[in-house]
Amino acid sequence: MKVIITENYEEMSKKASEILVSIVKNNPNAILGLATGSSPIGTYQNMIKDHKENGTSYKNVHTVNLDEYVGLTADHDQSYAYFMRTNLFYGLDIDLKNTNLPCGSAKDLQAECDRYNALLENYKQDVQVLGLGSNGHIGFNEPNTPFDSVTHLVDLTENTIKDNSRLFASIDEVPRQALSMGIKNIMNAKSILMVVSGKNKAEAVKGMVKGEITPALPASVLQLHPFVTVICDKEAGSLL
């Protein structure tokens, strides 16, 4: 596991975007595993800036996202499908037909999980972007999720609901369930790139990098992956 500690969020975002842009330049048909939340927004903004200034093309790139809220349609302004379009896809020349997320509004959620797992068999991520929850979750794989899990329905913890409530008008509006890639799906990626910022993530970063490998801290499983780069600001990395 390679850990890069940056001065601030802006430097973290720039370094992460440079890695992703390099992957796309070296492989125009790359499959990017993407994440939502506040952590990667700066990274995505830098990717858009590079595309506009340097012409890096995403026409043949495919993407697979980690997760989606249950009960929200793709056009809901709090859905992750909407997030990805507004924070990344609309700023690139990517074909939206090549972008993939679980469908949180599917009538049969288990069938949707099965569909997404089959998709991931065909689209093995060249890199999977991750954030890190304050409780150590990756994707929506909460503490004690089995390491061999694949795409599944998740009951969100109160900790995660509280963390995500800042993006909604009230905590009552935060969905209580999500569909998420499992830990096995994440670990199947050829490489992993994590971006993490803020002092509230410092304990989770320490446990992930130096602690016991345990389902109690899902991110600790990344110690077992051969190609992981963690880019964190100095607050998130303060306990290393």
Image (cartoon, grey):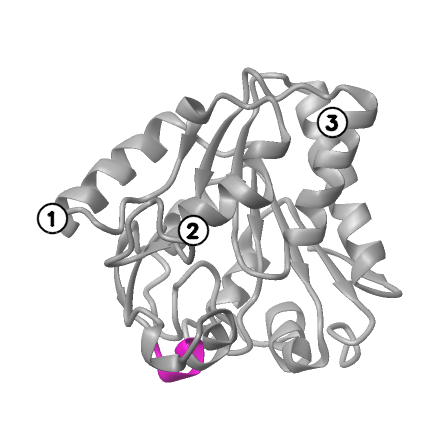
Other residues around mark 3 within 10 Å, as few (<14) / some (14–19) / many (≥20):
some
First in sequence: mark 1 or mark 3?
3
Can residue 159 be found in the magenta stretch? yes
- Residue lying at 60% horizontally and 70% vertically, measured from the top left: 208
Q: Give the Cα separation between the discs numbered 1 and 3.
A: 37 Å
Tell me the quarter of the picture where residue 118 sits.
top left
Q: Give the Cα separation between the discs numbered 2 and 3.
A: 22 Å
Q: Which residue is mark 2?
A: 80
Residue 177, image x, y percentages: 27, 66
* Element type where label 1 sits in the image: loop
* Element type where label 2 sits in the image: helix
Other residues around mark 1 within 10 Å, as few (<14) / some (14–19) / many (≥20):
few
Residue 218, image x, y percentages: 46, 68
Image vertical order of residue 57 relative to residue 9, above or below: above
Q: Tell me, for residue 107, which label it has, or none.
A: 1
Q: Amino acid at mark 2?
A: Tyr
First in sequence: mark 2 or mark 1?
2
Is mark 2 in CB contact (under 8 Å) with mark 1? no
- Residue lying at 50% horizontally and 44% vertically, measured from the top left: 84
Can residue 238 be found in the magenta stretch? no
Q: Nearer the viewer, residue 204 or 109?
A: 109
Q: Amino acid at mark 3?
A: His
Residue at the outermost left position? 108
Task: Tell me if 234 is positioned left or right of 89 in this view.
Answer: right
Q: Nearer the viewer, residue 180 or 173?
A: 173
Q: Amino acid at mark 1?
A: Lys
Tell me the quarter of the picture where residue 71 sits.
bottom left
The quadrant in which the N terminus is found is: bottom right
Q: Which residues are magenta?
A: 157-161
- Residue lying at 38% horizontally and 52% vertically, measured from the top left: 67
Q: Which residue is mark 3?
A: 51
Residue 120, image x, y percentages: 35, 34
